Image: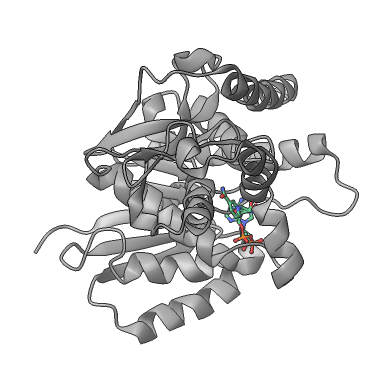
């Protein structure tokens, strides 16, 4: 039998963790034939709750789950990991300013970047779900100088999936009829879900919709503010869908995106499409064998240009703020 893939999950006792761990353990990531070993990191006060989650993992008797280790020491948990899903983050508390949030998360992602740099496997891939995801990924990447920069990405796959779902509902197509969706920029309200390059049954999506008002005033804000709508309805933030997107993103990264399609991933910019170099910004990418490439040659009209620029300006501001805090 094959050696297990070692997968680290941080914030494993949290909401997303409660969905994510069971998806990972049941084979959603690698299929039924490749075992995985879970390495679960939490802060000390959450370890008891995490022990309860591990009891439930045991009780599922998943054939693909080769082992589980838990702890609060990143250097121990990340030792030899092939994939690290950084989900745990500090939520914004009452009265917390943006700067407080960035420094609290900065401390977490600085330490985790250093630990990964020291002990992760040579082939490690790191996906950041915890918010502010793009800037947390930038902080981890900057603090892991020996890990190639292209091994870091931040999650915009949930936004991508939300955009596909909204477009399918509008056009009466099924989600599998929709290809080439793109989320550009930051995983925040400034993100730009782009219908000008997407396709519905092979037809350009903006043309298939034929309704600029819907695109501009319904589609884009619905996708960008979906997280808030879920909090409003459910009383807590999206968790199962975030876990599902985390699995989708990691699976496609390791196994490859589909022919004639692409996915959205926030990755380090090489300056493509005028996105300032070094920012972790969402792009259309194709993936293969653990590597990604930004899709090149898309024509960007003035409408899209303005939106991409607005979101990447926000990312540049976040970078300036964490630079000022001495985190990168
Ligand atoms: P949660 O608050 O239920 O769980 C977070 C867990 O992280 C907690 O158990 C906490 O103890 C743990 N944690 C905090 N600091 C840690 C550290 N230094 N090391 C290890 N664990 C640590 O939050 P939830 O709902 O699971 O969400 C997690 C993160 O994902 C949040 O930042 C949330 O904003 C973000 N998120 C991102 C999405 C995306 O699309 N990128 C979508 C939805 C949520």
Q: In percent of the image, x 57 and y 24: which residue is there?
A: 304
Number of numbered labels in the structure image: 0
* Most foreground residue, 190 or 48: 190
Residue sitting at the far right: 95
Tell me if 214 is positioned left or right of 73 in this view.
right
Q: In percent of the image, x 15 and y 66: which residue is there?
A: 33
Q: Residue 154: percent from the left, percent from the top?
A: 50, 39
Res 179 visible: yes
Q: Quadrant of residue 204?
A: top left
* Most foreground residue, 44 or 18: 18
Q: Quadrant of residue 234?
A: bottom right
Q: Quadrant of the C terminus?
A: top right
Q: Residue 148: percent from the left, percent from the top?
A: 36, 25
Q: Residue 158: percent from the left, percent from the top?
A: 51, 51
* Most foreground residue, 269 or 113: 269
Res 80 visible: no
Q: Quadrant of residue 36?
A: bottom left
Tell me if 131 is positioned left or right of 266 in this view.
right
């Amino acid at each position: 039998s094959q050696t297990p893939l070692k997968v680290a999950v941080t914030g494993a006792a949290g909401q997303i963790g409660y969905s994510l761990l069971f998806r990972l353990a049941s084979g959603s990531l690698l299929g039924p034939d490749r075992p995985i070993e879970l390495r679960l990191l939490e802060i000390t006060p959450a370890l008891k709750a995490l022990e309860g989650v591990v009891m439930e993992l045991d009780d599922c008797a998943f054939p693909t789950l080769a082992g589980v280790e838990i702890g609060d020491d990143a250097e121990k948990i990340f030792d030899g990991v092939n994939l690290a899903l950084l989900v745990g983050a500090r939520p914004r508390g009452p009265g917390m300013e943006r700067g407080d949030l960035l420094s609290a998360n900065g401390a977490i992602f600085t330490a985790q970047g250093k630990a990964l740099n020291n002990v992760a496997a040579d082939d490690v891939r790191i996906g950041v779900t915890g918010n502010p995801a793009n800037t947390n990924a930038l902080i981890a990447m900057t603090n892991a100088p020996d890990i190639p920069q292209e091994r870091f990405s931040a999650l915009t796959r949930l936004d991508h999936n939300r955009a596909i779902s909204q477009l399918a509902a509008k056009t009466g197509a099924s989600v599998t009829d929709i290809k080439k969706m793109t989320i550009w920029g930051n995983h925040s309200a400034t993100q730009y879900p782009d219908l000008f390059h997407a396709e519905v049954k092979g037809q350009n999506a903006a043309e298939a919709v034929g309704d600029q008002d819907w695109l501009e005033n319904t589609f884009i804000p619905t996708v960008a503010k979906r997280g808030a709508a879920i909090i409003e309805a459910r009383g807590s933030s999206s968790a199962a869908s975030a876990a599902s997107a985390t699995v989708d993103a990691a699976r496609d990264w390791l196994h490859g995106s589909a022919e004639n399609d692409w996915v959205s991933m926030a990755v380090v910019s090489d300056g493509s499409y005028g996105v300032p170099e070094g920012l972790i910004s969402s792009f259309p990418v194709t993936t293969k064998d653990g590597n990604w490439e930004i899709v090149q040659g898309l024509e960007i009209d003035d409408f899209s240009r303005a939106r991409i620029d607005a979101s990447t300006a926000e990312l540049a501001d976040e970078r300036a703020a964490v630079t000022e805090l001495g985190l990168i």
